[in-house]
Amino acid sequence: MHSSYAGARRGNQWTFVLLLVATFLFAPLHAMAQAKAQAATRTAPARTVLVMGDSLSAAYGLSAPQGWVALTGARIATSHPGWRVVNASISGETTAGGAARIAAQLKRVKPSVVVIALGANDGLRGLPLVQTRANLDRMIVASKAAGARVLLVGMRIPPNYGRDYTQGFEANYAALAKRRSVPLVPFLLAPIAADRANFQYDNLHPVAAAQPKIRDHVWKALDPLLR
């Protein structure tokens, strides 16, 4: 009995020694694996929403953080970790300018989602509707070919050029969204357009206080594309 007890005791001691050795050997390896996993998470490239717009999206007359695009970026940072917003909007931009820039922006940013919010300047200048439609179509096709989802954001214009032009301008967006199977925000300024107090002195560009309403309006269509 005594020798068996001693042998069992020695066996337990060896087991303890082996466990201790294993702990010292494998604990650092486990810690290294955790550290690598955390580092990979930290350095993983963010998925990007690229916004191609004009002055309405470039925060004209405001500081950049006040614009609806920047406000959208701030919301995405908290609601969808791992996403970011790149605003490539330019004041005065037409659909022709957007179509000319889209390839370079897609290559530079490699977006997962592209928001196309152009056309207002085409309408204000009375540019041919077929030209505006072709430019927007080119941007949609290029974005989809690059593997990005597309959100098309429409615009409405005053009836300065007559009913046919005004209605045709608005119809362009719906027709393109249907043809290319992309979601559509029919009118960017829908939640604020009826109140003059929402606009700056030029009656064209929204004030800072109206920007969150625009953000929320676009967000309803954008959020599903981030999932």
Image (cartoon, rainbow, N blue to C red):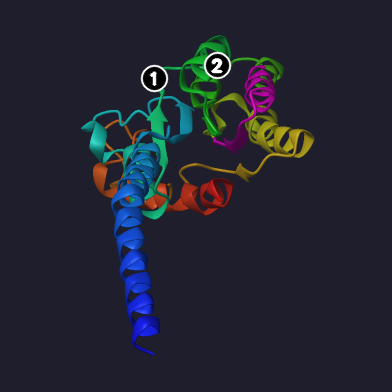
Residue 192 visible here: no
Segment colored magenta: 135-156
Question: x and y percent of residue 72 in the render?
Answer: 38, 44
From the viewer's perspective, is 212 left or right of 134?
A: left
Q: Nearer the viewer, residue 167 or 144?
A: 144
Quadrant of res 164? top right
Q: Where 118 sits versus 126, above or below?
A: below
- Residue placed farthest to the left in the image? 63
Report whether residue 207 is seen: yes
The residue singled out by tag 1 in the image is 90
What residue appears at the point 47 percent right and 50 percent down from the top-left corner?
219
The residue type indicated by label 1 comes to Ile
Which element carries disc 1, helix, strand or loop? Answer: loop
Query: Looking at the picture, how far across and down is residue 196, in whole percent?
Result: 33, 46
Q: Quadrant of the N terminus?
A: bottom left
In this rendering, which labeled residue sits more in front, label 2 or label 1? 2
Residue sitting farthest toward the right? 179
Mark carried by residue 134 = none
62 vs 168, nearest the viewer: 62
Where residue 170 sits in the image (x, y, percent)?
Answer: 64, 35
Q: Quadrant of residue 140?
A: top right
17 magenta-colored: no
Residue 121 image offset from top left, x and y in percent: 49, 21
Quickly name the residue at label 2: 102
Residue pictured at 52% horizontal, 24% vertical: 110
What residue type is disc 2 on? Ile
